[in-house]
Image (cartoon, coloured by chain):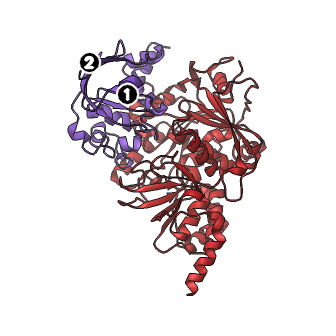
Chain colours: A red, B purple
Amino acid sequence: MGMTMTQKILAKHAGLDSVKAGQLIKVQLDLVLGNDITTPVAVKEFAKIGVDKVFDKDKVAIVPDHFTPNKDIKAAEQCKYIREFAHDKDITNYFEIGEMGIEHALIPEKGLVVPGDVVIGADSHTCTYGALGAFSTGIGSTDMAVGMATGETWLKVPTALKFVLTGKPSKWVSGKDVILHIIGMIGVDGALYKSMEFVGEGLKNLSMDDRLSMANMAIEAGGKNGIFLVDEKTIEYVKANSKKEYTIYQPDEDAEYEKVYEIDLSKIRPTVSFPHLPDNTRTIDQVGDIKIDQVVIGSCTNGRLEDLRVAAQILNGKKVAKGIRTIIFPATQKIYLQAMKEGLLEIFVNAGAVVSTPTCGPCLGGHMGILAKGERAVATTNRNFVGRMGHVESEVYLASPAVAATSALTGKISNPEKLEEIVCSQTASQAK
Amino acid sequence: MKAKGTVFKYGDNVDTDVIIPARYLNTSDPKELAKYCMEDIDANFVEKVKDGDIMVAGKNFGCGSSREHAPISIKVAGISCVIASTFARIFYRNAINIGLPILECDEAVQNIDAGDSVEINFNEGIIYNQTKGQSYKAEPFPEFIQEIMKADGLVKYTSNKIKAGE
């Protein structure tokens, strides 16, 4: 029996010729990651293991991104604690404010993950790096601690779902819409314990930013990992960002998949996840009249340069609707700087939006954009659970940067395809 | 190993944000975390729960964030075991790694109601519902995972291995 892409990577890292689904294996790790919420617990556990050093100081990454810039005294203490650990263990890849970014945007940008790697991270969205043809998955703090100490972790070899992508997405449809569509189709546990492998000729029509956004949300379908075939775009991205050696794995022709889904990208509509689960999706044509209070554009899902460019294209020369708090978060310092050079930040500020330093803040209801009781946000983030962005009676609607930016202009969830009509009606009402 | 207690029952897809909302994650102190356990799904849980009580829920329990604070808060709040139809995979790992007993048993979930008195024999995987006079058999864990559980979590398991020079 042949192996899937994921199975091949895992076999190699377990020192085995082959593995099969269900097998428990021990794998060598290329990178172990943590943030300012999960690392403090990992540091406490690390101290109990009985080793002095991390297994490889170049293969641990610590990124304080959730409650930073420190939101309160307790958060500051947590950051101080992990900063001291990073210093004490001489961790190469500790990224302080000023050089940091949202971890899952930062790590690929820094070239710390390349095709064929095995990565674990104490953050559920670690699955993002599957976009680069690596195996990467979220784990908890204790797994992070043991990973830092030993350079190994145990894994159950997953079965896989195959997504064969064809066609080209229409103008305002992005990777975010594709992944929301898929989650809506298979459910929040549709890929539980499984790999999601993305293949097909449609891949060439998805940018790296699209793919990172899609792999990022594999966890929202319960997936162990999401992984993309490596193509020219991947290689170009990796060569531009990394000096690490990479290995390209292809699935075997006779690899076994639990299910194969054919997805025609040209048929996907802009898609919105309604509260309170990511699989509660509707196409933009089905949303109805949903008034909003806040728009958030950013996060590890959609805070990359293309996301900001799309938002800027929509907001350019216009004003957000009166009273709609529009908060935009470039995901890393590099993205922030490039957005500044391209004039995107100026467009945002002129439109009446605010631009923040990189942080996970509002996505998880941490800081920088918390919702009050009864308030609604359209967000390009990844979760719309009860209370996710603030009060237990607030609501989050997940969408692409294009839908979010258009909604900021109207104050209700809106279709970017109707941008011209929206602009005309606003101009007309201003003229009255 | 046995557990016995009163059941708190929840539905499908209980996520880690409702188990321990992010607004409380600016600490990793287990006792502090336990004060807010289940706050966004069952506001009075912490007042009602007694040591040894049992949590029963539907499918995909613990979905969402990787925060180990979620199983920690449940364990320190006094829950002796979580029974669910299925667990989200990171929660499953985290529970085993920190020594929070969990069992997968859809039959138990279908038949147990909130407030039932339930006794669990972990060695045999038997869940006995005293209120209804029914027994259910949970899925056994793979041997390797049982070893981690016997060692009281992954850290002790690993440190034992390191001490033994493995």
Q: Vertically, is A356 above or below B151?
A: below
Q: Pointer 2: residues within 10 angstroms few (<14), some, or many (20+)?
A: few
Q: Left or right: A303 with respect to A43? A: right
Query: What residue would you read off at disc 1?
Result: B110
Q: In which quarter of the image is the N terminus of chain A?
A: top right
Q: Which residue is drawn at 74% across and 25% down?
A: A252
Q: Position of residue A113 (x, y in %)?
A: 64, 39
Task: Tell me the element at label 1.
Answer: helix
Q: Left or right: B54 with respect to A427? A: left
Pointers 1 and 2 in contact (C-beta within 8 Å):
no
Disc 2 chain ID: B
Q: Pointer 1: residues within 10 angstroms few (<14), some, or many (20+)?
A: few
To which quarter of the image does residue A262 belong? Answer: top right
Callouts 1 and 2 in the same chain: yes
Which of the two labelled residues, at mark 1 and mark 2, occupies the earlier sequence position? 1
Inspect this view and state whether residue A120 appears: no
Alpha carbons under labels 1 and 2: distance apart: 15 Å
